[in-house]
Image (cartoon, coloured by chain):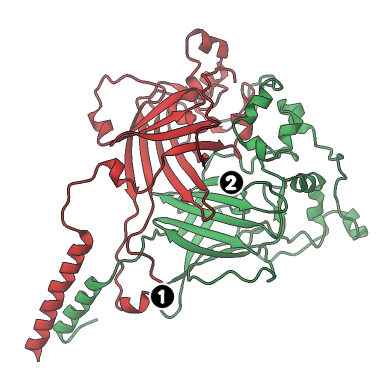
Chain colours: A green, B red
Protein backbone atom coordinates (compact mmCIF):
# COMPACT_ATOMS: atom_id res chain seq x y z
CA UNK A 1 0.00 0.00 0.00
CA UNK A 2 1.32 3.43 -0.93
CA UNK A 3 -0.02 6.63 0.57
CA UNK A 4 0.13 9.56 -1.80
CA UNK A 5 -0.40 12.01 1.07
CA UNK A 6 1.98 11.29 3.93
CA UNK A 7 -0.20 13.29 6.28
CA UNK A 8 -2.97 10.76 5.99
CA UNK A 9 -0.61 7.96 6.80
CA UNK A 10 0.57 9.82 9.86
CA UNK A 11 -3.01 10.45 10.88
CA UNK A 12 -3.79 6.75 10.68
CA UNK A 13 -0.78 5.91 12.81
CA UNK A 14 -1.90 8.45 15.41
CA UNK A 15 -5.38 6.98 15.51
CA UNK A 16 -3.81 3.58 16.00
CA UNK A 17 -1.88 4.89 18.95
CA UNK A 18 -5.10 6.37 20.28
CA UNK A 19 -6.78 3.00 20.27
CA UNK A 20 -7.82 1.66 23.65
CA UNK A 21 -6.29 -1.62 24.75
CA UNK A 22 -8.59 -4.58 25.06
CA UNK A 23 -8.38 -7.25 27.70
CA UNK A 24 -5.46 -9.61 27.60
CA UNK A 25 -5.80 -12.49 25.22
CA UNK A 26 -3.62 -15.49 24.72
CA UNK A 27 -3.31 -17.28 21.43
CA UNK A 28 -4.45 -20.86 21.81
CA UNK A 29 -4.24 -21.70 18.12
CA UNK A 30 -2.54 -24.98 17.35
CA UNK A 31 -2.51 -28.60 18.39
CA UNK A 32 -1.96 -29.41 22.04
CA UNK A 33 -0.64 -32.86 22.80
CA UNK A 34 -1.76 -34.54 26.01
CA UNK A 35 1.23 -34.77 28.36
CA UNK A 36 -0.26 -34.71 31.85
CA UNK A 37 0.54 -37.58 34.17
CA UNK A 38 -2.88 -37.79 35.81
CA UNK A 39 -4.71 -41.10 35.57
CA UNK A 40 -7.97 -39.65 34.22
CA UNK A 41 -8.62 -42.31 31.67
CA UNK A 42 -6.01 -44.88 32.50
CA UNK A 43 -7.90 -47.26 34.76
CA UNK A 44 -8.29 -50.78 33.44
CA UNK A 45 -10.90 -51.99 35.90
CA UNK A 46 -14.53 -51.61 34.73
CA UNK A 47 -15.68 -50.57 38.20
CA UNK A 48 -13.34 -47.80 39.32
CA UNK A 49 -15.31 -44.91 40.75
CA UNK A 50 -12.52 -43.82 43.10
CA UNK A 51 -12.82 -40.16 44.00
CA UNK A 52 -15.87 -39.56 41.83
CA UNK A 53 -18.50 -37.51 43.73
CA UNK A 54 -21.38 -39.62 42.48
CA UNK A 55 -24.89 -39.38 43.87
CA UNK A 56 -26.79 -42.57 44.70
CA UNK A 57 -28.40 -42.38 41.27
CA UNK A 58 -25.03 -41.78 39.65
CA UNK A 59 -23.60 -44.87 41.31
CA UNK A 60 -26.59 -46.99 40.31
CA UNK A 61 -26.30 -45.78 36.73
CA UNK A 62 -22.57 -46.54 36.65
CA UNK A 63 -23.03 -50.04 38.03
CA UNK A 64 -25.79 -50.89 35.59
CA UNK A 65 -23.64 -50.05 32.60
CA UNK A 66 -22.34 -52.79 30.35
CA UNK A 67 -19.88 -51.55 27.75
CA UNK A 68 -21.41 -53.99 25.27
CA UNK A 69 -24.23 -51.45 25.01
CA UNK A 70 -21.92 -49.41 22.79
CA UNK A 71 -22.15 -52.17 20.19
CA UNK A 72 -25.89 -51.68 19.73
CA UNK A 73 -26.54 -50.22 16.30
CA UNK A 74 -28.15 -47.08 17.63
CA UNK A 75 -25.29 -46.42 20.08
CA UNK A 76 -22.20 -47.08 18.00
CA UNK A 77 -22.06 -43.52 16.75
CA UNK A 78 -22.95 -41.76 19.95
CA UNK A 79 -20.22 -39.44 21.11
CA UNK A 80 -18.75 -38.75 24.48
CA UNK A 81 -19.79 -35.65 26.44
CA UNK A 82 -17.52 -32.59 26.81
CA UNK A 83 -15.60 -34.05 29.79
CA UNK A 84 -13.97 -36.36 27.27
CA UNK A 85 -11.75 -33.48 26.16
CA UNK A 86 -9.97 -33.96 29.51
CA UNK A 87 -10.16 -37.72 29.98
CA UNK A 88 -9.85 -38.82 26.36
CA UNK A 89 -6.63 -39.84 24.63
CA UNK A 90 -6.27 -37.29 21.84
CA UNK A 91 -4.83 -33.78 21.45
CA UNK A 92 -6.86 -30.59 21.53
CA UNK A 93 -6.78 -28.83 18.20
CA UNK A 94 -7.64 -25.15 18.66
CA UNK A 95 -8.49 -22.75 15.87
CA UNK A 96 -9.91 -19.24 15.72
CA UNK A 97 -13.23 -18.55 14.07
CA UNK A 98 -13.19 -14.92 12.90
CA UNK A 99 -16.21 -12.84 12.12
CA UNK A 100 -16.29 -12.81 8.31
CA UNK A 101 -16.83 -9.04 8.14
CA UNK A 102 -14.88 -7.55 11.05
CA UNK A 103 -12.32 -10.34 11.46
CA UNK A 104 -12.85 -10.05 15.20
CA UNK A 105 -12.65 -13.27 17.16
CA UNK A 106 -16.09 -14.82 17.04
CA UNK A 107 -15.29 -18.18 18.58
CA UNK A 108 -12.61 -20.66 19.46
CA UNK A 109 -13.09 -24.10 18.00
CA UNK A 110 -11.72 -27.32 19.45
CA UNK A 111 -11.84 -29.85 16.66
CA UNK A 112 -13.68 -33.08 17.26
CA UNK A 113 -12.24 -36.59 17.29
CA UNK A 114 -13.76 -39.78 15.95
CA UNK A 115 -15.93 -40.09 19.06
CA UNK A 116 -16.03 -36.54 20.46
CA UNK A 117 -17.99 -33.75 18.88
CA UNK A 118 -16.29 -30.44 18.18
CA UNK A 119 -16.56 -27.69 20.77
CA UNK A 120 -17.30 -24.18 19.56
CA UNK A 121 -16.65 -21.62 22.29
CA UNK A 122 -18.65 -18.55 21.33
CA UNK A 123 -16.89 -15.38 22.42
CA UNK A 124 -19.40 -12.82 21.16
CA UNK A 125 -21.60 -12.71 24.23
CA UNK A 126 -24.52 -14.64 22.80
CA UNK A 127 -26.83 -16.22 25.40
CA UNK A 128 -27.26 -19.93 26.00
CA UNK A 129 -30.41 -21.42 24.46
CA UNK A 130 -33.59 -22.13 26.38
CA UNK A 131 -33.55 -25.08 28.77
CA UNK A 132 -35.84 -27.01 26.48
CA UNK A 133 -33.73 -26.44 23.37
CA UNK A 134 -32.41 -29.58 21.65
CA UNK A 135 -29.27 -31.10 23.13
CA UNK A 136 -26.29 -32.26 21.08
CA UNK A 137 -23.29 -34.40 21.99
CA UNK A 138 -20.98 -31.38 22.04
CA UNK A 139 -23.42 -29.03 23.71
CA UNK A 140 -23.47 -25.25 23.52
CA UNK A 141 -20.48 -23.33 24.83
CA UNK A 142 -19.77 -19.69 25.55
CA UNK A 143 -16.47 -18.22 26.68
CA UNK A 144 -14.87 -15.10 28.09
CA UNK A 145 -11.42 -13.91 29.03
CA UNK A 146 -10.48 -13.42 32.66
CA UNK A 147 -7.08 -11.85 32.36
CA UNK A 148 -4.99 -14.32 30.40
CA UNK A 149 -7.32 -17.21 31.16
CA UNK A 150 -9.99 -18.41 28.78
CA UNK A 151 -13.08 -19.50 30.66
CA UNK A 152 -15.96 -21.39 29.11
CA UNK A 153 -19.26 -22.97 30.08
CA UNK A 154 -20.99 -25.78 28.20
CA UNK A 155 -24.65 -26.66 28.56
CA UNK A 156 -27.15 -28.57 26.41
CA UNK A 157 -25.13 -31.75 25.99
CA UNK A 158 -26.52 -35.24 25.97
CA UNK A 159 -26.11 -37.94 28.56
CA UNK A 160 -22.77 -39.69 28.30
CA UNK A 161 -20.06 -41.40 30.26
CA UNK A 162 -17.51 -39.15 31.88
CA UNK A 163 -14.56 -41.32 32.79
CA UNK A 164 -14.07 -43.91 30.10
CA UNK A 165 -17.21 -45.94 30.82
CA UNK A 166 -17.17 -45.29 34.55
CA UNK A 167 -19.90 -42.92 35.61
CA UNK A 168 -22.24 -40.69 33.64
CA UNK A 169 -23.39 -37.13 33.31
CA UNK A 170 -27.02 -36.38 32.51
CA UNK A 171 -28.48 -33.99 29.96
CA UNK A 172 -28.94 -31.46 32.77
CA UNK A 173 -25.23 -31.21 33.49
CA UNK A 174 -23.04 -28.12 33.09
CA UNK A 175 -19.34 -28.14 32.32
CA UNK A 176 -17.10 -25.19 33.21
CA UNK A 177 -13.54 -24.88 31.92
CA UNK A 178 -10.43 -22.87 32.61
CA UNK A 179 -7.74 -22.79 29.94
CA UNK A 180 -4.46 -21.52 31.42
CA UNK A 181 -1.55 -21.21 29.02
CA UNK A 182 1.94 -21.19 30.53
CA UNK A 183 4.48 -21.01 27.72
CA UNK A 184 4.01 -24.12 25.61
CA UNK A 185 1.88 -25.80 28.27
CA UNK A 186 -1.88 -25.56 28.50
CA UNK A 187 -3.61 -26.59 31.70
CA UNK A 188 -7.31 -27.33 31.39
CA UNK A 189 -9.38 -27.45 34.55
CA UNK A 190 -12.86 -28.89 34.09
CA UNK A 191 -15.66 -28.68 36.64
CA UNK A 192 -18.65 -30.85 35.89
CA UNK A 193 -21.89 -30.25 37.77
CA UNK A 194 -24.91 -32.46 37.44
CA UNK A 195 -28.02 -32.41 39.65
CA UNK A 196 -28.87 -35.96 38.61
CA UNK A 197 -25.74 -38.10 38.82
CA UNK A 198 -23.32 -36.04 40.93
CA UNK A 199 -23.59 -35.02 44.58
CA UNK A 200 -20.81 -32.42 44.26
CA UNK A 201 -18.85 -30.89 41.39
CA UNK A 202 -16.45 -33.30 39.72
CA UNK A 203 -13.14 -31.58 39.00
CA UNK A 204 -10.46 -32.91 36.70
CA UNK A 205 -7.38 -31.35 35.14
CA UNK A 206 -5.22 -32.19 32.18
CA UNK A 207 -2.01 -30.69 30.84
CA UNK A 208 -1.24 -30.35 27.14
CA UNK A 209 1.88 -29.25 25.27
CA UNK A 210 1.88 -27.32 21.99
CA UNK A 211 3.12 -29.60 19.27
CA UNK A 212 3.94 -29.49 15.60
CA UNK A 213 3.64 -33.23 15.30
CA UNK A 214 0.04 -34.02 16.19
CA UNK A 215 -1.34 -37.51 16.37
CA UNK A 216 -4.98 -36.70 16.01
CA UNK A 217 -8.00 -38.85 15.27
CA UNK A 218 -10.16 -36.59 13.15
CA UNK A 219 -13.90 -36.46 13.36
CA UNK A 220 -15.31 -38.46 10.46
CA UNK A 221 -18.66 -39.83 9.48
CA UNK A 222 -19.59 -42.85 11.59
CA UNK A 223 -21.23 -45.86 10.01
CA UNK A 224 -22.72 -48.52 12.30
CA UNK A 225 -21.79 -52.10 11.59
CA UNK A 226 -22.75 -55.43 13.09
CA UNK A 227 -20.45 -55.74 16.09
CA UNK A 228 -22.23 -58.26 18.30
CA UNK A 229 -24.55 -60.66 16.48
CA UNK A 230 -26.75 -61.14 19.52
CA UNK A 231 -27.64 -57.46 19.49
CA UNK A 232 -28.62 -57.58 15.84
CA UNK A 233 -30.59 -60.76 16.26
CA UNK A 234 -32.50 -59.17 19.11
CA UNK A 235 -32.67 -55.38 18.60
CA UNK A 236 -34.70 -55.01 21.78
CA UNK A 237 -31.76 -56.19 23.87
CA UNK A 238 -29.94 -53.48 25.83
CA UNK A 239 -26.82 -54.85 27.54
CA UNK A 240 -26.83 -53.92 31.22
CA UNK A 241 -26.29 -55.28 34.72
CA UNK A 242 -28.99 -55.57 37.36
CA UNK A 243 -28.31 -54.03 40.78
CA UNK A 244 -25.52 -55.84 42.60
CA UNK A 245 -24.78 -58.07 39.61
CA UNK A 246 -21.85 -56.28 37.99
CA UNK A 247 -19.29 -59.04 37.46
CA UNK A 248 -16.31 -56.67 37.97
CA UNK A 249 -17.64 -55.14 41.18
CA UNK A 250 -14.87 -56.55 43.35
CA UNK A 251 -11.99 -56.37 40.88
CA UNK A 252 -10.34 -53.28 42.40
CA UNK A 253 -10.62 -54.74 45.87
CA UNK A 254 -9.08 -58.04 44.83
CA UNK A 255 -6.24 -56.42 42.93
CA UNK A 256 -5.40 -53.44 45.13
CA UNK A 257 -6.99 -54.22 48.52
CA UNK A 258 -9.04 -51.03 48.29
CA UNK A 259 -12.29 -51.39 50.24
CA UNK A 260 -15.39 -51.65 48.07
CA UNK A 261 -16.99 -48.63 49.74
CA UNK A 262 -14.15 -46.48 48.35
CA UNK A 263 -14.26 -48.13 44.95
CA UNK A 264 -17.90 -47.10 44.63
CA UNK A 265 -17.07 -43.40 44.97
CA UNK A 266 -19.16 -40.66 46.49
CA UNK A 267 -18.25 -37.12 47.47
CA UNK A 268 -16.65 -38.10 50.77
CA UNK A 269 -14.04 -40.20 48.96
CA UNK A 270 -12.37 -37.15 47.42
CA UNK A 271 -11.56 -35.39 50.70
CA UNK A 272 -8.42 -36.00 52.78
CA UNK A 273 -10.34 -37.02 55.92
CA UNK A 274 -11.56 -40.09 54.07
CA UNK A 275 -8.10 -41.52 54.55
CA UNK A 276 -8.83 -41.94 58.24
CA UNK A 277 -11.67 -44.30 57.41
CA UNK A 278 -9.33 -46.34 55.26
CA UNK A 279 -6.36 -46.49 57.54
CA UNK A 280 -7.53 -49.45 59.59
CA UNK A 281 -9.08 -51.26 56.65
CA UNK A 282 -6.35 -51.02 54.08
CA UNK A 283 -3.28 -53.19 53.72
CA UNK A 284 -0.99 -52.53 50.76
CA UNK A 285 -1.11 -55.37 48.27
CA UNK A 286 1.83 -57.65 47.67
CA UNK A 287 4.70 -56.11 45.72
CA UNK A 288 4.27 -56.02 41.99
CA UNK A 289 6.63 -58.45 40.35
CA UNK A 290 9.58 -57.05 38.38
CA UNK A 291 8.40 -55.79 35.03
CA UNK A 292 5.01 -55.11 36.58
CA UNK A 293 2.92 -51.98 36.44
CA UNK A 294 4.42 -48.91 34.85
CA UNK A 295 7.71 -47.24 35.49
CA UNK A 296 9.12 -48.13 32.10
CA UNK A 297 11.75 -45.96 30.57
CA UNK B 1 -4.38 23.01 3.57
CA UNK B 2 -1.36 20.81 4.11
CA UNK B 3 -0.13 23.18 6.83
CA UNK B 4 -3.42 22.84 8.69
CA UNK B 5 -3.29 19.10 8.34
CA UNK B 6 0.18 19.04 9.78
CA UNK B 7 -0.95 21.06 12.77
CA UNK B 8 -3.82 18.70 13.39
CA UNK B 9 -1.51 15.74 13.11
CA UNK B 10 0.98 17.31 15.48
CA UNK B 11 -1.77 17.98 18.02
CA UNK B 12 -3.04 14.45 17.76
CA UNK B 13 0.45 13.06 18.18
CA UNK B 14 0.91 15.05 21.37
CA UNK B 15 -2.49 14.02 22.69
CA UNK B 16 -1.97 10.42 21.67
CA UNK B 17 1.36 10.11 23.42
CA UNK B 18 -0.02 11.89 26.44
CA UNK B 19 -2.80 9.38 26.59
CA UNK B 20 -0.45 6.47 26.24
CA UNK B 21 1.73 7.94 28.96
CA UNK B 22 -1.30 8.28 31.18
CA UNK B 23 -2.16 4.65 30.52
CA UNK B 24 1.31 3.61 31.46
CA UNK B 25 1.34 5.89 34.47
CA UNK B 26 4.24 7.90 35.74
CA UNK B 27 7.28 5.93 36.74
CA UNK B 28 6.65 4.62 40.20
CA UNK B 29 8.85 2.58 42.48
CA UNK B 30 7.86 -1.08 42.25
CA UNK B 31 5.34 -2.11 44.84
CA UNK B 32 6.25 -4.95 47.18
CA UNK B 33 4.93 -8.34 45.97
CA UNK B 34 2.28 -8.44 48.66
CA UNK B 35 0.78 -5.14 47.53
CA UNK B 36 1.22 -6.00 43.86
CA UNK B 37 -0.47 -9.40 44.11
CA UNK B 38 -2.84 -9.82 41.15
CA UNK B 39 -4.58 -12.71 42.93
CA UNK B 40 -5.25 -13.45 46.57
CA UNK B 41 -4.15 -16.96 47.46
CA UNK B 42 -4.40 -16.57 51.23
CA UNK B 43 -6.68 -18.79 53.23
CA UNK B 44 -7.34 -22.45 53.93
CA UNK B 45 -7.53 -24.84 51.00
CA UNK B 46 -8.44 -28.52 50.86
CA UNK B 47 -7.06 -30.86 48.24
CA UNK B 48 -9.69 -32.52 46.08
CA UNK B 49 -8.55 -36.03 45.20
CA UNK B 50 -10.38 -36.99 42.03
CA UNK B 51 -7.22 -37.95 40.15
CA UNK B 52 -4.50 -40.49 40.90
CA UNK B 53 -6.62 -41.62 43.82
CA UNK B 54 -5.05 -45.06 43.98
CA UNK B 55 -1.56 -43.61 44.45
CA UNK B 56 -2.48 -40.67 46.68
CA UNK B 57 -5.18 -41.79 49.11
CA UNK B 58 -3.57 -45.12 49.94
CA UNK B 59 -0.01 -46.39 49.83
CA UNK B 60 0.31 -48.32 46.57
CA UNK B 61 2.06 -51.63 46.27
CA UNK B 62 5.80 -51.67 46.00
CA UNK B 63 6.55 -51.75 42.29
CA UNK B 64 3.33 -50.04 41.22
CA UNK B 65 4.73 -47.17 39.13
CA UNK B 66 1.94 -46.79 36.60
CA UNK B 67 1.98 -43.41 34.86
CA UNK B 68 5.58 -42.50 35.73
CA UNK B 69 8.50 -43.01 33.37
CA UNK B 70 11.75 -43.60 35.22
CA UNK B 71 15.33 -44.05 34.09
CA UNK B 72 16.91 -47.42 34.90
CA UNK B 73 18.67 -45.74 37.82
CA UNK B 74 15.38 -44.34 39.11
CA UNK B 75 13.74 -47.70 38.78
CA UNK B 76 16.52 -49.28 40.77
CA UNK B 77 15.99 -46.79 43.59
CA UNK B 78 12.25 -47.36 43.53
CA UNK B 79 12.62 -51.13 43.60
CA UNK B 80 14.75 -50.78 46.72
CA UNK B 81 12.07 -48.81 48.60
CA UNK B 82 12.09 -49.77 52.27
CA UNK B 83 9.89 -47.70 54.61
CA UNK B 84 11.46 -49.33 57.67
CA UNK B 85 14.86 -48.06 56.58
CA UNK B 86 13.47 -44.56 56.06
CA UNK B 87 12.02 -44.60 59.54
CA UNK B 88 15.29 -45.85 61.02
CA UNK B 89 17.24 -43.05 59.36
CA UNK B 90 14.71 -40.37 60.29
CA UNK B 91 13.68 -39.85 56.67
CA UNK B 92 9.99 -40.58 56.95
CA UNK B 93 9.26 -37.21 55.29
CA UNK B 94 10.69 -38.32 51.95
CA UNK B 95 7.25 -38.32 50.31
CA UNK B 96 6.40 -34.86 51.67
CA UNK B 97 9.03 -32.85 49.77
CA UNK B 98 7.98 -29.92 47.59
CA UNK B 99 7.66 -31.95 44.33
CA UNK B 100 5.11 -34.23 46.01
CA UNK B 101 3.60 -32.17 48.83
CA UNK B 102 0.80 -30.48 46.88
CA UNK B 103 -0.42 -33.91 45.76
CA UNK B 104 -0.52 -35.33 49.29
CA UNK B 105 -4.16 -35.34 50.46
CA UNK B 106 -4.55 -32.65 53.09
CA UNK B 107 -5.09 -28.98 53.68
CA UNK B 108 -2.83 -26.05 53.06
CA UNK B 109 -2.88 -22.69 54.77
CA UNK B 110 -1.50 -19.81 52.73
CA UNK B 111 -0.42 -16.58 54.43
CA UNK B 112 2.05 -13.76 53.86
CA UNK B 113 5.04 -14.18 56.15
CA UNK B 114 6.21 -10.72 55.16
CA UNK B 115 5.84 -8.42 52.16
CA UNK B 116 8.04 -10.62 49.99
CA UNK B 117 7.35 -14.15 51.23
CA UNK B 118 4.32 -16.39 50.88
CA UNK B 119 4.12 -19.11 53.50
CA UNK B 120 2.37 -22.37 52.64
CA UNK B 121 1.72 -24.65 55.60
CA UNK B 122 0.55 -28.19 54.93
CA UNK B 123 -1.17 -30.16 57.67
CA UNK B 124 -0.16 -33.48 56.06
CA UNK B 125 3.39 -34.02 57.21
CA UNK B 126 3.37 -30.64 59.02
CA UNK B 127 5.53 -29.09 56.33
CA UNK B 128 6.10 -25.43 55.47
CA UNK B 129 7.03 -24.00 52.10
CA UNK B 130 8.36 -20.47 51.79
CA UNK B 131 7.84 -18.88 48.39
CA UNK B 132 10.15 -15.88 48.24
CA UNK B 133 9.97 -13.11 45.65
CA UNK B 134 13.14 -11.62 44.20
CA UNK B 135 16.30 -13.13 42.79
CA UNK B 136 16.33 -15.93 45.30
CA UNK B 137 17.85 -18.56 43.03
CA UNK B 138 20.61 -16.25 41.83
CA UNK B 139 21.49 -14.96 45.26
CA UNK B 140 21.39 -18.19 47.23
CA UNK B 141 24.66 -19.15 48.87
CA UNK B 142 26.66 -21.85 47.15
CA UNK B 143 26.51 -23.98 50.26
CA UNK B 144 22.79 -23.47 50.92
CA UNK B 145 21.47 -26.56 52.67
CA UNK B 146 19.20 -28.96 50.85
CA UNK B 147 15.83 -29.45 52.49
CA UNK B 148 12.57 -31.29 51.81
CA UNK B 149 10.98 -28.03 50.67
CA UNK B 150 14.06 -26.57 48.97
CA UNK B 151 14.50 -22.94 47.98
CA UNK B 152 11.56 -21.45 46.12
CA UNK B 153 11.61 -18.32 44.02
CA UNK B 154 8.20 -16.79 43.34
CA UNK B 155 7.11 -14.40 40.64
CA UNK B 156 3.77 -12.85 39.83
CA UNK B 157 2.67 -13.24 36.23
CA UNK B 158 0.12 -10.47 35.93
CA UNK B 159 -2.21 -10.51 32.99
CA UNK B 160 -1.09 -7.73 30.69
CA UNK B 161 -3.24 -5.99 28.16
CA UNK B 162 -1.98 -6.29 24.66
CA UNK B 163 -2.69 -3.33 22.43
CA UNK B 164 -4.01 -4.50 19.10
CA UNK B 165 -4.26 -1.94 16.40
CA UNK B 166 -7.86 -0.87 16.12
CA UNK B 167 -8.78 1.60 13.47
CA UNK B 168 -12.24 2.27 14.82
CA UNK B 169 -12.17 1.77 18.57
CA UNK B 170 -15.28 3.83 19.16
CA UNK B 171 -17.42 1.25 17.41
CA UNK B 172 -16.27 -1.48 19.72
CA UNK B 173 -16.77 -0.06 23.15
CA UNK B 174 -19.97 -2.00 23.70
CA UNK B 175 -18.31 -5.39 23.74
CA UNK B 176 -14.81 -4.39 24.73
CA UNK B 177 -13.79 -5.92 28.05
CA UNK B 178 -12.44 -3.71 30.86
CA UNK B 179 -9.20 -1.87 30.18
CA UNK B 180 -7.41 -3.42 33.11
CA UNK B 181 -7.66 -7.18 32.93
CA UNK B 182 -7.97 -8.98 36.21
CA UNK B 183 -6.22 -12.09 37.35
CA UNK B 184 -2.76 -13.45 37.04
CA UNK B 185 -0.70 -16.40 38.06
CA UNK B 186 2.01 -17.26 40.56
CA UNK B 187 5.10 -18.92 39.12
CA UNK B 188 7.36 -20.75 41.54
CA UNK B 189 10.69 -22.41 40.82
CA UNK B 190 12.15 -24.65 43.50
CA UNK B 191 15.64 -26.11 43.74
CA UNK B 192 18.04 -27.17 46.52
CA UNK B 193 15.87 -30.12 47.33
CA UNK B 194 16.73 -33.06 49.46
CA UNK B 195 16.15 -36.26 47.46
CA UNK B 196 12.70 -37.70 48.09
CA UNK B 197 9.74 -39.59 46.68
CA UNK B 198 7.08 -38.50 44.21
CA UNK B 199 4.91 -41.31 45.47
CA UNK B 200 4.72 -42.94 48.85
CA UNK B 201 6.00 -46.22 47.42
CA UNK B 202 9.44 -44.90 46.64
CA UNK B 203 9.25 -43.40 43.12
CA UNK B 204 12.27 -41.12 43.50
CA UNK B 205 13.40 -37.65 42.58
CA UNK B 206 17.00 -36.64 43.07
CA UNK B 207 18.43 -33.64 44.90
CA UNK B 208 19.01 -31.97 41.54
CA UNK B 209 15.35 -32.06 40.57
CA UNK B 210 13.83 -28.74 39.52
CA UNK B 211 10.21 -28.06 40.39
CA UNK B 212 8.31 -25.42 38.38
CA UNK B 213 4.75 -24.53 39.35
CA UNK B 214 2.04 -22.18 38.16
CA UNK B 215 -0.65 -21.41 40.72
CA UNK B 216 -3.92 -20.35 39.09
CA UNK B 217 -6.99 -19.19 40.93
CA UNK B 218 -10.55 -19.73 39.77
CA UNK B 219 -13.37 -17.74 41.33
CA UNK B 220 -16.77 -18.99 40.32
CA UNK B 221 -19.97 -16.96 40.14
CA UNK B 222 -21.40 -19.03 43.02
CA UNK B 223 -18.60 -17.85 45.31
CA UNK B 224 -16.52 -21.03 45.20
CA UNK B 225 -12.77 -20.57 44.79
CA UNK B 226 -10.57 -23.22 43.24
CA UNK B 227 -6.82 -23.43 42.86
CA UNK B 228 -5.03 -25.43 40.17
CA UNK B 229 -1.28 -25.92 40.53
CA UNK B 230 0.37 -26.88 37.25
CA UNK B 231 3.38 -28.86 38.41
CA UNK B 232 6.50 -29.81 36.42
CA UNK B 233 9.21 -31.97 37.91
CA UNK B 234 12.38 -32.20 35.85
CA UNK B 235 14.90 -34.74 36.98
CA UNK B 236 16.92 -36.33 34.18
CA UNK B 237 18.68 -38.57 36.67
CA UNK B 238 15.62 -40.52 37.79
CA UNK B 239 12.82 -39.47 35.43
CA UNK B 240 12.97 -40.09 31.71
CA UNK B 241 10.17 -37.57 31.08
CA UNK B 242 9.17 -34.31 32.69
CA UNK B 243 6.53 -35.24 35.25
CA UNK B 244 3.43 -33.06 34.74
CA UNK B 245 0.47 -33.01 37.08
CA UNK B 246 -2.11 -30.46 38.13
CA UNK B 247 -3.51 -31.00 41.64
CA UNK B 248 -6.63 -29.05 42.58
CA UNK B 249 -7.67 -27.35 45.82
CA UNK B 250 -10.94 -25.82 46.96
CA UNK B 251 -11.04 -22.89 49.36
CA UNK B 252 -12.56 -23.42 52.79
CA UNK B 253 -14.10 -20.70 54.95
CA UNK B 254 -11.81 -21.30 57.93
CA UNK B 255 -9.31 -23.66 59.51
CA UNK B 256 -11.81 -25.76 61.47
CA UNK B 257 -10.76 -28.91 59.60
CA UNK B 258 -7.03 -28.25 59.92
CA UNK B 259 -5.49 -31.51 61.10
CA UNK B 260 -1.70 -31.50 61.55
CA UNK B 261 -0.35 -35.00 61.10
CA UNK B 262 3.33 -35.96 61.22
CA UNK B 263 5.11 -37.56 58.31
CA UNK B 264 4.62 -41.26 57.81
CA UNK B 265 6.79 -43.50 55.69
CA UNK B 266 4.07 -46.12 55.41
CA UNK B 267 0.70 -44.27 55.27
Q: Mark 1 points at which residue?
A: A103
Q: In this view, does A84 lie above or below A20?
A: above
Tell me: A128 left or right of A18: right
**Residue located at (90% from left, 54% from top):** A230
Q: Which of marks 2 and 1 is nearer the N terminus?
A: 1
- Give the percent coordinates (x, y) of residue A120: 55, 66
Q: Residue B30 carries which label?
A: none
- Give the percent coordinates (x, y) of residue B161: 32, 60
- Give the percent coordinates (x, y) of residue A129: 62, 71
- Give the percent coordinates (x, y) of residue A17: 22, 71
Question: Is residue A103 or residue A114 the one in the foreground?
Answer: A103
Q: Residue A8 lies in what quarter of the image?
A: bottom left
Question: Is residue A171 or residue B61 the one in the foreground?
Answer: A171
Secondary structure at numbered mark 1: loop
Instruction: Measure how far apart labels 2 and 1 are at the Cα level.
Output: 35 Å
Q: Mark 2 points at which residue?
A: A203
**Residue located at (77% from left, 27% from top):** A254
Question: Is residue B122 or residue B210 the one in the foreground?
Answer: B122
Amino acid sequence: MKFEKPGIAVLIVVIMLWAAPVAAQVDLTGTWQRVGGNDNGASQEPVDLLGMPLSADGRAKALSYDIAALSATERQCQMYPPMYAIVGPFPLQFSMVPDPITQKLLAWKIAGWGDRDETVIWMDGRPHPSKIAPHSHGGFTTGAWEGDTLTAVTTHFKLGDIKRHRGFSSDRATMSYRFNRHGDLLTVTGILEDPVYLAEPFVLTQIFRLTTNPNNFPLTACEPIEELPRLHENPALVPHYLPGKHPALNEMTKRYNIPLEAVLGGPETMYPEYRKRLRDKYVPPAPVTPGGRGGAK
Amino acid sequence: MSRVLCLVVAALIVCGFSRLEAQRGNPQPPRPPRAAAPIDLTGYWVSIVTQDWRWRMVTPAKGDYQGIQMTPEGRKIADAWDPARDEATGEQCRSYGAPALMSVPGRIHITWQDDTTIKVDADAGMQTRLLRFGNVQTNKPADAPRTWQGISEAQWLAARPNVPLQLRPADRTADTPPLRPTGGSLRVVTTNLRAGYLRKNGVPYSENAVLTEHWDLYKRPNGEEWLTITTQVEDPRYLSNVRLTAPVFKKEPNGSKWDPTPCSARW
